[in-house]
């Protein structure tokens, strides 16, 4: 995954918002954020799958819970 603006490396990030987990991509170079809904709108389901498969949502929720405890 490369940034469309600067071609820098992007890392996947998960953001908890109103009880739902959103999968985002963040550029390490320019800080650009892309969420998977944008990717969906661009009709590139392979990228969405990539974001969702990296870690299951269940595992992520577990992680969030351990941080909140
Ligand atoms: Zn960038």
Image (cartoon, rainbow, N blue to C red):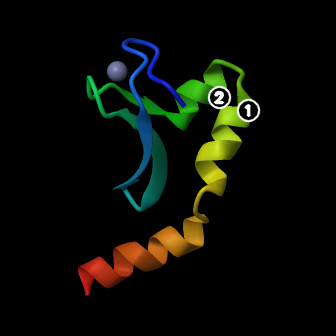
First-in-chain label (1 vs 2): 2
Q: Circles 1 and 2: CB distance less than 8 Å?
A: yes
> Residue 24, relative to residue 45: is it above or below?
below
| Label at residue 45 | 1
Q: Is mark 1 within 8 Å of ligand 1?
A: no
- Residue furthest out toward the bottom: 69
- Circle 2 SS class: helix
Q: Which image quarter: residue 41?
A: top right
For the N terminus, the image quarter is top right
> Residue 69, relative to residue 50: is it above or below?
below
Q: Which image quarter: residue 43?
A: top right
- Residue furthest out toward the top: 5
Percent across and percent down for residue 27 are: 35, 30
60 on left or right of 66? right
| Label 2 sits on residue | 40
The residue shown at (66%, 55%) is: 53
- Circle 1 SS class: helix
Percent across and percent down for residue 50 are: 65, 44
* Residue in front for this viewpoint, 22 or 18: 22
> Residue 19, relative to residue 6: is it above or below?
below
The residue shown at (37%, 56%) is: 18
- In this view, the mark in front (1 or 2): 1
Q: Residues within 10 Å of mark 2 (few under 14, many from 20)?
A: some
The residue shown at (47%, 48%) is: 22
For the C terminus, the image quarter is bottom left
Ligand 1 found in image quarter:
top left
- Residue furthest out toward the front: 8
């Amino acid at each position: 995954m490369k940034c469309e603006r600067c071609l820098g490396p992007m890392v996947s990030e998960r953001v908890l918002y109103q009880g739902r987990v959103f999968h985002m991509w963040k550029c390490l170079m320019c800080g650009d954020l892309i969420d998977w809904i944008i990717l969906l709108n661009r009709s590139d389901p392979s990228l969405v799958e990539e974001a969702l498969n990296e870690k299951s949502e269940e595992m992520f929720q577990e992680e969030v819970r351990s941080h909140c405890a």
